[in-house]
Image (cartoon, rainbow, N blue to C red):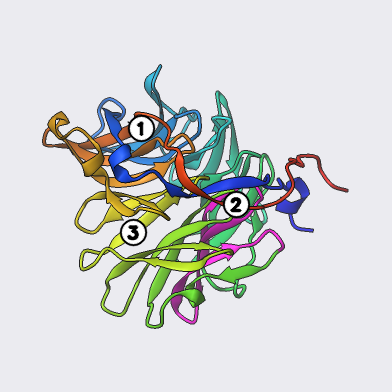
């Protein structure tokens, strides 16, 4: 039994929306988030189902993680004694993960309304970064950096443990984890960076091997509670494509023609978001294919949406855009939560949540 299986959440039986209303019925209202005072620029990382957003503001020599709420605005994710911090993900408990630096010492963290914990690396070593967290407060990321990085998992307050890998010396990182303890990211094998699913049964699933021949590198960016994975890959001509994988439909290559694209995130209704290499924020659904988000907003509002970073189950999308000529961050809310035009019924598991430690 693996670490994550001890607190395993069984995904409920669900009806997943494999098709969403036509884009003519979708419309978004865009709000500027900005960042913390004194920042040169800010970047968005994630949005939870409470519609709370996390990101990071940058100024010369430092960075500071923040949370945005509609009722509060932008507030710093405060970490005592930290010289700098980066916020990477937020769950539905408002627990935030990321990594921080203190006197040149870098460490992953988890924080929740004033309480915070260091996420020690594999075997308690220092150095590393926490990238994703699920609703059971299980988190993933990496221990070490560059060629020495290893995909790592954490249970709140416990030292990190290594996730399964292709080999003990191969670098790897996990970016996101779902509520069943399944995580995705990348791992190196035979010199190639490969999109990888780190299973909670202590095995790896090579998503890269299901991509077209000639693929030179690939990364898995997100996994939802139904086991749908999104990411992107490059061919030998450095052209980029998105992909969507699930065990029912297999691997789907998402092509945006000569422009290329990346997919960043997917919600539990099967709506994915990303960006084109031509700086267009994109939405993808099984039914509509790719939609330029700029076609779904008021053209008189002064927005050019360039990168959709994350989407929650309410259909809220957060990312980066240009507002009246200034590059900034945004949250876009649908006028109404999209209703599926047709449904594919997928039985995923038991309708219970096991959060009790198994002995």
What residue sits right under mark 2 in the picture?
345
Q: Position of residue 259 (x, y in %)?
A: 21, 64
First reached walking from the N terminus: tag 3 or tag 2: 3
Q: Is residue 152 shown above or below 235?
A: above
Q: Does residue 39 appear anywhere in the picture?
A: yes
First reached walking from the N terminus: tag 2 or tag 1: 1
Q: Residue extending furthest front?
A: 342
Q: Residues within 10 Å of mark 3 (few under 14, many from 20)?
A: many
Q: Which quarter of the rendering shows the N terminus?
A: bottom right
Q: Residues within 10 Å of mark 2 (few under 14, many from 20)?
A: few
Question: Residue at point 25% right, 27% down?
Answer: 38
What residue sits right under mark 1 in the picture?
334
Q: Is residue 191 left or right of residue 292?
A: right
Question: Residue at point 74% right, 47% down?
Answer: 350
Tag shown at residue 262: 3
Observer-nearest of 358 and 334: 334
Q: Position of residue 75 (x, y in %)?
A: 39, 24
Q: Is residue 235 shown above or below 77?
A: below
Q: Is residue 317 shown above or below 265?
A: above
Asked if the stretch drawn in magenta spans residue 147, the answer is: no
Observer-nearest of 128 and 67: 67
Question: Residue at point 31% right, 55% down?
Answer: 290
Magenta stretch: dominant secondary structure? strand
Question: Residue at point 39% right, 72% down?
Answer: 217
Q: Is residue 139 left or right of residue 355?
A: left
């Amino acid at each position: 039994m693996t670490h994550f299986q001890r607190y395993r959440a069984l995904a409920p039986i669900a009806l997943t929306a494999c098709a969403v209303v036509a884009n003519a019925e979708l419309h978004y209202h865009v709000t500027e988030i900005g960042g913390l005072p004194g920042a040169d620029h800010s970047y968005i990382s994630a949005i939870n189902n409470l519609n709370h957003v996390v990101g990071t503001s940058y100024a010369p020599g430092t960075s500071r993680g923040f949370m945005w709420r509609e009722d509060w605005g932008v507030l710093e994710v405060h970490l005592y004694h930290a010289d700098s911090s980066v916020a990477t993900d937020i769950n539905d408990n408002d627990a935030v993960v990321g990594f921080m630096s203190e006197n040149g010492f870098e460490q992953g963290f988890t924080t929740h309304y004033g309480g915070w914990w260091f996420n020690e690396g594999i075997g308690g070593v220092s150095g590393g970064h926490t990238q994703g967290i699920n609703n059971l407060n299980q988190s993933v990321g990496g221990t070490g950096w560059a060629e020495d990085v290893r995909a790592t998992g954490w249970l709140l307050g416990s030292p990190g443990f290594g996730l399964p890998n292709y080999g003990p010396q191969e670098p790897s990182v996990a970016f996101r984890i779902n509520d069943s303890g399944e995580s995705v990211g990348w791992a190196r094998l035979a010199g190639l960076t490969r999109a990888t699913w780190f299973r909670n049964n202590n095995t790896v699933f090579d998503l890269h091997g299901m991509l077209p021949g000639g693929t030179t590198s690939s990364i898995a960016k997100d996994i939802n509670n139904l086991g749908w994975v999104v990411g992107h890959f490059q061919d030998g001509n450095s052209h980029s494509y998105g992909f969507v994988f699930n065990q029912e439909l297999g691997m789907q290559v998402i092509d945006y023609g000569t422009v290329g694209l990346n997919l960043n995130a997917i919600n539990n209704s099967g709506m994915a978001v990303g960006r084109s290499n031509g700086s267009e924020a994109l939405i993808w659904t099984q039914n509509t294919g790719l939609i330029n988000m700029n076609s779904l907003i008021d053209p008189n509002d002064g927005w050019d949406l360039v990168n959709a970073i994350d989407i929650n189950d309410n259909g809220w999308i957060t990312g980066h855009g240009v507002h009246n000529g200034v590059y900034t961050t945004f949250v876009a809310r649908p006028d109404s939560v999209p209703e599926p035009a047709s449904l594919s019924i997928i039985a995923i598991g038991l309708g219970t949540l096991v959060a009790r430690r198994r002995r």
